[in-house]
Amino acid sequence: MTVRIGTRASKLALTQSQQAADQLAAVGGFPVELVRIKTEGDVRTGSLSQMGGTGVFVAALRDALLANACDVAVHSLKDLPTGAAPGLTIAATPKRVDVRDALCARDGLKLADLPAGAKVGTGSPRRAAQLRAARPDLDVVDIRGNVDTRLGRVPGLTGNAEDAPGDLDAVVLAAAGLERISRLDVVTEFFETDVMLPAPGQGSLAIECRAADAPGQAGSLEGSQGAQSTQNALAQALAALNDEDTRLAVTAERAVLARLEAGCAAPVGAYAYRKGSMLYLEAVVCAVDGSKTVREKKATDGLTEVGATLLGIEVAELLLAAGAADIADLAASR
């Protein structure tokens, strides 16, 4: 039986979903096919933050899973809401790639080189706030569109002049996405985390499936012995693709968001990583205009999902105690 992989139809989504599908097929020994699913975020126009954040890219994929239109769905983990989806589970978080944000500017310019008043595009309030904090003299512009569309807003970053208005001096994108579609050539500067903390889960994929099909469960596929065999092979492949260090890190980061009751579009950054016997976490909450930021960090030796979750909650509490709710619209403060 063929395992169906649900994915958005954008170039980046198809690329990362195909990579995940190839890995699952190689480990599980079963054929795979991509099922393209159109999401609300692909149809609607306007600011992502006004539509409720990047979660608008997720609902249709989850509906397809629950309706048995696909067997697993591949998400950019930073797009997933922190709340649980009844009947579904994140079965695997493959090894994380570059977490950093990247500046893609005209003429090879770096952030410090951009002239006062330079127009920098991003669709992320988190990136916009940290850009304004680092360079309050920039004109940060809210933009939408896929990677190629965004790069086309910057002169010299695309070869198709008809589709490239070239009206911006730079855009900020996730390094991971550029790496996955082989476009790191357009990066003029990678932002280290002391300048711009990434979105929780950035650089990570989430492979989601029905809870009954997750590793360790009995399975939801009924019928032939072949169906059961495929389900067992899928569960084993999902378990093999899961990277435990990545899982711990993103669990801590997402626990920060959950405790703050901040959505995917909130001006909140978080980055966790394991080093030796410790899990380290740093998080930031920013005023949208960049005028104020609050940063906190902490570590734990509790290398379990419970320990990672508690670490995220503790850092969120430190942020709230330091006045995070006074500079950003967080539901946790209401």
Image (cartoon, rainbow, N blue to C red):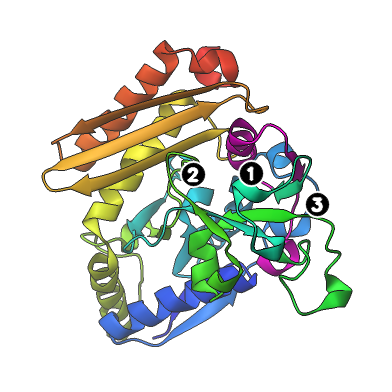
Residue at image position (72%, 50%) is 121
The crowding category of the residue bearing disc 3, from other C-alpha atoms within 10 Å (few below 14, some 14 to 19, many at least 20), is few
Instruction: Tell me if residue 327 is in the magenta stretch.
Output: no
Q: Of marks 2 and 3, which one's residue comes earlier in the chain? A: 3
What type is the residue that disc 3 sits on?
Thr
Quarter of the view holding residue 93: bottom left
312 or 178: nearer the viewer: 178
* Residue 102: % across, % down: 55, 56
Which label was assigned to residue 199?
A: 2
Seen in the picture, residue 262 relative to 48 is either above or below; the reply is above
Q: Is residue 186 left or right of residue 194?
A: right
What type is the residue that disc 2 sits on?
Ala
Determine whether the residue tagged by mark 3 lies in a helix, strand or loop.
loop
309 or 230: nearer the viewer: 309
State the residue position of label 3.
Answer: 45
Determine whether label 1 and label 2 are within 8 Å by CB: yes
Quarter of the view holding residue 188: bottom right
Q: Nearer the viewer, mark 1 or mark 3?
A: 1
State the residue position of label 1.
Answer: 124
* Residue 127: % across, % down: 59, 42
Which quadrant does the N terminus fall into?
bottom left
Q: Of marks 1 and 2, which one's residue comes earlier in the chain? A: 1
Seen in the picture, residue 214 relative to 199 is either above or below; the reply is below
Residue 237 shows in this picture: yes
Instruction: Tell me if residue 139 is in the magenta stretch.
Output: yes
The crowding category of the residue bearing disc 1, from other C-alpha atoms within 10 Å (few below 14, some 14 to 19, many at least 20), is many
Determine whether the residue tagged by mark 2 lies in a helix, strand or loop.
loop
What type is the residue that disc 1 sits on?
Ser
Q: What is the magenta range?
A: 123-150
* Residue 125: % across, % down: 64, 38
Q: CA distance from mark 1 to mark 2?
A: 9 Å
